[in-house]
Amino acid sequence: MPVISKKKIKIGRLKPVPGFTACGMSCGIKKNGKKDLALIVSDAPAAVAGVFTTNKVKAAPVMLSIARVKKGWTRGVVINSGNANACTGRRGDKDAMAMTAAVEKALGLKTGEMLAASTGVIGVPLPVKKIEAASDALASRLRNNGLAEVSEAILTTDAFPKTAFLSVNIHGVKISIAGIAKGAGMICPDMATLLAFFMTDAAIKPAALRRALKEAVDVSFNGISVDNDMSTNDTALAFASGASNPKEIKAGTPDFRRFTSLLTEVAQRLARMIVMDGEGATRFITLEVCGAASRKDAASAAKTVASSMLVKTAFFGGDPNWGRILAALGRAGIKMKEDRVDVFFNGVQVVKRGLDTGKEKKAARAVNPAEVLVRIGLNMGDFSTVHWTSDLSYEYVKINSAYRT
């Protein structure tokens, strides 16, 4: 059986982003002593944008950050792993406030200038006293190349950190974007279960940054699936320091399109790493849907197939069971005609106009590699999309049956 080699996955080399410092350390939340507390700080107030879980059950730090992001400006975010501070009632709200207050005090900032994010076990009170006790030490560790520590400190069941860094010249000035993320389980579209943070030195106002982040998330974190479970803590934050001091990037301009493309590429690299690190995953599946009647239909088709437990288990077993794909398409709520559908596995056509092509042996060999490209032609229109998903293995059940023990 093929296995995704996590050792061979190319991790983006992080470089310092002007205007930001960061660090990560252990404060004792995780029993194994690994890093569990992190900090990202802007030298001056930074423009900020956020996208959060659509789950009606939202963690306390999510609610705090949703409220504070509306201001459009912030000095950064404090993050803990090992405890989600979700489903913890009024105490959770107070603990999220205390978490940011401790860091704000250590940095000499005003109340409300920091955001918060948490990830880990749900329903357990946050050991906020450990965070408060570590705040001074955390603040003292800040440095311009500290993002790698942050990428380690936010991990839970992840096998490796997810990082990416890209830059582009705009008006002769280099603009950089660094991205870090965590996520391996509870990964479901709208948006996928994760924490993600983007830092850029571009000069861009909050409204334009919100638009760019939404566009990037729609074609990255909203296009991945591991297990069709949505978290209470999903948070993606983008910070813009303006430290490169170029001309302001305004929405609707060619510069904005270049910036958004760069942000999207960073987000997609992180999204693909999350799927590759899917809990127990042995196959990475790229799902292309083309010929849909509308953009909405393309997305619905892709999400339904990518999230199908039967489709995912078939890929785990190396079974080219295309019937499960057609069955998923049929319940996706899209415009389709069975006798127009084409399906390809790594270039081998297994369905032509809704019927089996008789290439069972070639199809079996096609789905055997650790990476599989599934192309679905609906032949109903001109819209297309790409999603990334993984298979579903015995190991996934093992990991999640004993997550708290």
Image (tube, rainbow, N blue to C red):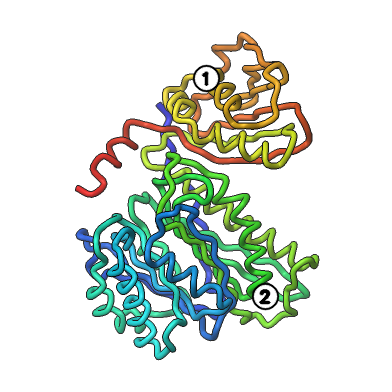
Residue placed under numbered mark 1 in the picture: 320
Residue 30 at x, y percent in the picture: 24, 61
Is residue 123 rendered to the left or right of residue 112?
A: left
Q: Given the current orientation, which residue lies at the most extreme bottom position?
A: 108
Is residue 127 rendered to the left or right of residue 279?
A: left
| Residue found at x 56% / y 49% | 222
Residue 85 at x, y percent in the picture: 32, 63
The answer to the question of whether label 2 and label 1 lie on touching residues, with beta carbons closer than 8 A, is no
Residue 86 at x, y percent in the picture: 33, 59
Name the image quarter holding the N terminus.
top left
| Residue found at x 52% / y 54% | 270
| Above/below status of 5 relative to 129 | above
Is residue 28 rendered to the left or right of residue 185?
A: left
* SS at mark 1 in the image: loop
| Above/below status of 25 relative to 245 | above
- Amino acid carrying label 2: it is Ile
In front: mark 2 or mark 1? Answer: 2
Place residue 352 in its image quadrant: top right
Residue placed under numbered mark 2 in the picture: 204
80 or 86, which is in the foreground?
A: 86
Q: Earlier in the sequence, mark 2 or mark 1?
A: 2
Whether residue 101 is visible: yes
| Above/below status of 377 relative to 63 | above
| Residue found at x 27% / y 56% | 123
| Residue found at x 35% / y 64% | 153
Residue 16 at x, y percent in the picture: 52, 73
Determine the CA span between mark 2 and mark 1. Answer: 47 Å
* SS at mark 2 in the image: loop
- Amino acid carrying label 1: it is Pro
Q: Crowdedness of circle 1 by 10 Å Cα count: few (<14), some, many (20+)? A: many
| Above/below status of 28 relative to 293 | below
Whether residue 8 is visible: no
